[in-house]
Every structure is written in C-alpha cells, then in structure tokens.
Image (spheres, grey):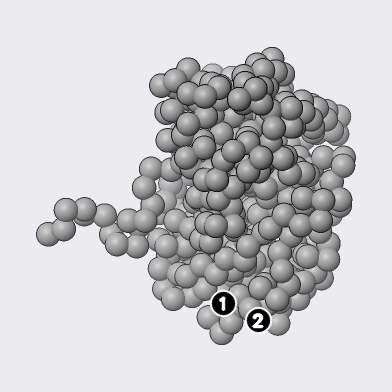
Amino acid sequence: MTSDPLVERMRPFGTTIFSEMSALAVRTGAINLGQGFPDTDGPAEMLDAAARALREGANQYPPLPGIPALRQAIAAHDQRFWGLTRDPDSEIVVTAGATEAVAAAILALCEPGDEVVCFEPYYDSYAASIALAGAVRRPVTLRPGHGGRYAFDEGELRAAFGPRTRMVLLNSPHNPTGKVFTRAELDLIAALCQTHETYAVTDEVYEHLVFTDAAEPHVPLASLPGMRERTLRISSAGKTFSCTGWKIGWATGPAPLVSALTRVKQFLTFVNAGPLQPAVAVALGLPDDYFTGFRAGLQARRDRLVTGLAEAGFDVLPSEGTYFVTADITRSGGTDGVDFCRALPERCGVVAVPTQVFYDHQEAGRHLIRFAFCKREEVIDEAAKRLAKLAGR
C-alpha cells in the first residue's frame, strides 16, 4: 500500500492557496486581500426573506432542481438582463454554488481522455474537476497586452482544439485577471465550438460586476448564434449579493444538458440550502438600482485599492470586472509570486494571492499577484497604508 491513499489523479491538488493564505492572515493578524469574500452582508430584503423562510418551515429537502420560485426567478433574471429565454421546469437546476455546477457539468459531459479547452490562469477548482473526470485540460494562456489588458493568441486557441475536444470552459468576467472577454473573442470561441462540435460551459458568477470603464460589456456566450443549444451557463448568488457562504448557484441551458448535469449533481449534494433559496429568489428580483449601485460601490473600492497599490510601487493591470485586480511585482523587487506573497504579511501586514498557481505554464504568471477589493473602504485604506511601507524600502 502507498503512503498516500489519495487516487493518483488528485495528488497534484493539495491545500488550496486560498486556505494557505487565509491561515497566514489569521496567524499574522494581516489584512486578508487574498480570498474573494466580502466583509459586509447582502441586501436587507434578501436577509429578511431568509429569516422568514427559516421560521416558516422551509427547512426540509427542497426539490432536486431547486424550488419553483427560485427557478422562475432565475429564468426571469436571464430574460431581463441578457434576453435569454429558459423553461424553469426543464432548463434550470439549482446547485451548491457555481463550483458544484462546474464540477457536475464536467463529470456529466466528459469521458476519460476527453479534452477540455480552458483559459489560464484559471480558478483552481477547474483543474481539479477535469482531473476527477479523467479528462485532459488544454490551457490557452491569457497574457497582458496592449494597455495591460489580458488577451489570448488566436493561433494558440485554434491549436488547442482537436479530435478529442469535448468542451470549452470559459470564465467571463474572469477570475483572477478581471478580464471581460470581447465580442470578437467570443465570436471566435463560438465558431470553434461549432466547427469542432463541442460543448461550452460558461462560469459567469461576476456577470453583474463589469465596470463602466471596461472595453466592452459582458455578453453571455449562450446568446451568440448557434450557441444556445450547446452551452451550459453557470452563475450564483454569492458574488452579486455578498452571500458567498450560502453556496447557491445554478446552471441554465438546453434541457438535455441540464438533465445530464442534474443526474450527476443528485449524487454530489442532492440538494442544498432549502431555506435560503426563497431569499435568493427575492434578491434576483431586486430593482435595477441595486445592481448598478452594487457595481458602482465595487468600482470605487477598486479605484481606491489601485491607487494604493500604485503608490506602493506595483505595476497594476486593468481590472474590467470581478472582485479582483492583479499587479506585477517586478518593480517591487519580486521575482516569484509565491515567495512574495508568503513574505508580504511579515513585511507590511497584508495578504495577497500569487496567480502563478492558477497556470499550467507557471512562468507566464510568476511575476503576478492578485488582490481582492470586495472589502469595506476603511479596510482598503488601512491595507493601502500598510502597503505604502513597501515603497519606502
């Protein structure tokens, strides 16, 4: 028997960088700008609805696809914001966060040896889910280009497709880079999906967090010609409504794909968060000024942090959306993001995350680190004050 009983395909995945850096923040008393969770609660209407549901008996198993009220709210939301029409009874399933939806989609659609085209840096659960399915990832690297905005090479993307390509996994708005994929990029991805007869799984949890200075607005891949019937679109309540601990996500798409995902999902968590589902239904129906106000508040905090990072000596790359901004550590004397982030709490009392751990080709991201700005203004100001110590050394 081996010393490590873990199956071989999962051995490369140890403790996540988020757990390591959050533990470092606790141990050192540093401000945690590493993990992307807000330090304020969501809208009062949503919290009040959750309290009512807890007291009024919504504490048992909900239906496997999610309660009807939430599925109807998701359908209305997608129609309202993106012009996407979905049948709440057959084309929507509620999941334990977007993470479960991504994992269930990959497990449902990929046979061992199938290939998944994805963009690096990627959220770490993507690689783990692909490995669980016995599939093979084909990463296409996003690199800072004109004006620091991330882009991919068209030739590299075309070369990533082949006879075993089963799926494209796309995250836009993109974590950790803050990139919003352009319409031209999406058109190319859509064309390749159709040429190679592949599915698309889109992680759009930051769909409402695209800033006013982004080069282009967010466009769901499923809304492009020829993509509705081959795309699973995934989102969640956590980021838009500041309730990351609730773990309520969903997948929408054509009935056969949603059915496939659901048949896997039922053996992962079966169902989740019964009393919180009615509250998310309420949140999805909030007026437009909630969504625009939430975005504006985050954009102001992004600008606040970017100013502090620049004054501390970082070269800050543009962030068009999400909770995050990335910075180049070269001018700050760093050459390796992991070493830099592990030392940062002792140097100035702030925690960040090295983005190189989200690459297969780690050299492409070795000099980049990620900061989260989904924090209260006074926390960001204190972090900027501490980071300023770096400029004086």
Residue 372 visible: yes
Relative to 80, 55 lies left or right: left
The disc placed on residue 12 is none
Q: Observer-nearest residue: 174 or 240?
A: 174
**Percent of width and height locating residue 77:** 77, 44
Q: Residue 304 lies in what quarter of the image?
A: top right
Examine the rendered structure and indicate whether residue 40 appears above or below residue 257. above
The disc placed on residue 196 is 2
Examine the rendered structure and indicate whether residue 161 appears above or below residue 43. below
Q: Residue at the spot x=62%, y=41% of the render? A: 329
Residue 281 visible: no
Q: Residue at the spot x=62%, y=66% of the render? A: 140
Relative to 190, 296 lies left or right: right
Q: Residue 311 lies in what quarter of the image?
A: top right
Secondary structure, mark 1, is strand
Query: Which residue ends up furthest to the front in the rendered image?
Result: 393
Q: Which residue is mark 1?
A: 165
Q: Amino acid at mark 2?
A: His
**Percent of width and height locating residue 145:** 76, 57
Relative to 309, 132 lies left or right: left
Q: Residue at the spot x=86%, y=29% of the render? A: 289
Which class describes the residues within 10 Å of circle 1: few (<14), some (14-19), or many (20+)?
Answer: many
Quarter placement of the C terminus = top right
Quarter placement of the N terminus = bottom left
Q: Amino acid at mark 1?
A: Thr
Which class describes the residues within 10 Å of circle 2: few (<14), some (14-19), or many (20+)?
Answer: some
Examine the rendered structure and indicate whether residue 360 appears above or below residue 79. below
Q: Residue 68 lies in what quarter of the image?
A: top right
Tell me whether circle 2 and circle 1 mark residues in contact (CB < 8 Å). yes
Relative to 241, 136 lies left or right: left
Q: Observer-nearest residue: 310 or 276?
A: 310
Q: Observer-nearest residue: 70 or 41?
A: 41
